[in-house]
Image (tube, rainbow, N blue to C red):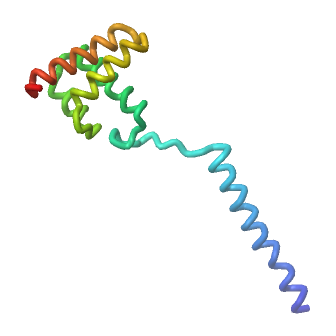
Amino acid sequence: MDENQEKNHWYLLTGLIVGLVIGLLISLLVAPVVNADALPPDLSADAKADYREKIALAYSANYDLERAISRLELLEDSNPVGGLISQAQESLAMGAPEPVTKALGDLATRLSELLGQ
C-alpha cells in the first residue's frame, strides 16, 4: 500500500515540470515581453536616431530650445551637437524627407550657436 501511494504523487511533479517548460516556451517564443518603458540611454542606435528625429521635429514646430535640450540630455550623448549633425548628414544621404533633415540641421545649428561650438 505504501508503494502505491508514492507512485500517485509523481504526476504532480511531472505536471509541474511540464507546465514550467510549456510556460517558458510560450513566454520566450510565442508571446515575448516587449519593454515599452525603456529609458532613452538604453535604446538601440536606430531608436536613438528616431528619438533625435522626433526631438528635432518637435523643436521645428514650437522652437522651444530648452525643451529640446532637456530631451537631448535624456539620451546622455557625449556630443549631442555632433550626433545631430551626423544624423542630419546621414538622413540627407539616405534621401529622408526634407523637413526631417532640415529640422535636424536647424536644431544642431541652434545648439552649436548656444554652446559656442
Give x and y (percent) for residue 20. Answer: 69, 62
Instruction: State whether residue 51 is above or below residue 24.
Output: above
Instruction: State whether residue 8 is above or below residue 19.
Output: below
Q: Residue furthest bottom?
A: 2
Viewer-nearest residue: 18 or 103 = 103
Q: Quadrant where the N terminus lies?
A: bottom right
Residue drawn at the location 26% of the way across and 37% of the way down: 77
Viewer-nearest residue: 106 or 17 = 106
Q: Quadrant of residue 112?
A: top left
Q: Quadrant of residue 21?
A: bottom right
Q: Quadrant where the C terminus lies?
A: top left
Give x and y (percent) for residue 115. Answer: 10, 28
Give x and y (percent) for residue 104. Answer: 28, 18
Q: Is residue 92 left or right of residue 106?
A: right
Residue drawn at the location 25% of the way across and 16% of the way down: 105
Instruction: State whether residue 6 is above or below residue 51.
Output: below
Residue drawn at the location 55% of the way across and 45% of the way down: 33
Viewer-nearest residue: 89 or 48 = 89
The number of callouts visible is: 0
Give x and y (percent) for residue 90. Answer: 37, 19
Q: Residue furthest top?
A: 98
Residue drawn at the location 23% of the way across and 19% of the way down: 59
